[in-house]
Amino acid sequence: MFIVLLGPPGAGKGTQAQRIAAATQLLHISTGDMFREHVKGGTELGKQANEYMSKGDLVPDALTIQMLLERIGRADAAEGAMFDGFPRNVPQAEALDAALAGRAAKVDHALLISAPDDELLSRLGGRWICRNCGHLYHERNDPPKKAGICDLCTGELYQREDDRPGVVMARLEKQKPPVALIEHYRKADILSEIDGKQSLDAVTAVLLEAIK
């Protein structure tokens, strides 16, 4: 099974992807994590991507697609995956469709989580990430038991540079799923739209039901 998780920054894609992965045992492929892996590893693709990420700009399609194709070619993606942050536009969606068709597979579900801009800004400003295991927290909606410490591994929590207010505004404008992308999956009759203003548990329940 291959699932695409869509939504603007702060809609809860990362948190919900973790929950869905835990409930379904489906591999979670986060575009952001994929970029950071290449940057940390000092790969040529990572160096190129970092030039854009450091300014809050989107990584060009060509780089993103190269990284994605490399990632789904690994053994742990043989049985399927859930894509968080990819595709961002129709050309990326078409590249994914072609890559999956080459292995006799396809996107089975596209799940769109939405929320108004003021809610997104509030959420992004309160997001924290474990420096060790990458688990996501939110100081208002899903706080750790002890401030600054991960519940799972006791690692240090931090805020990403691209969650700073100025960069957040730029991200919201640039990273909302375009109408054409949403229509791409609507026409394929695999799109489910979810109200992201609901509680975390409510959104998780609706997403899992949509998958079933």
Image (cartoon, rainbow, N blue to C red):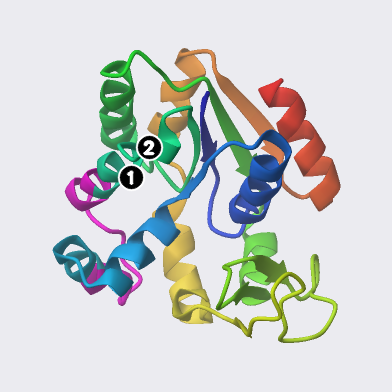
Structural crowding at the residue carrying mark 1, measured as other residues with C-alpha within 10 Å and reported as few (<14), some (14–19) or many (≥20)? some
Q: Residue at x 71, y 80 (%)?
A: 154
Quadrant location, the C terminus:
top right
Furthest-front residue in view? 75
The answer to whether residue 175 shows anywhere in this view is: yes
Residue type at numbered disc 2: Ala
Nearest the viewer among 164 and 47 is 47
- Residue 207 lies, in percent from the top left, at 71, 34
Is there any visible trace of residue 198 in the rendered image? Answer: no
Residues at marks 2 and 1 touching, judged by CB atoms closer than 8 Å = no
Q: Is residue 38 left or right of residue 140?
A: left
Residue neighbourhood size for the residue with mark 2, other residues' Cα within 10 Å, grouped as few (<14), some (14–19), many (≥20) = few
Q: Name the residue under label 2.
A: 75
Where does residue 60 sit, x and y in percent of width and height? 22, 53
**Disc 1 target residue:** 71
The answer to whether 141 is drawn above or below residue 114 in the figure is below
Marks 2 and 1, how far apart at CA:
9 Å
Where does the magenta region start and end? 50-66
Please check the rendered image and state whether residue 55 is part of the magenta-colored stretch, yes or no: yes
Mark carried by residue 118: none
Q: Residue at x 77, y 42 (%)?
A: 203
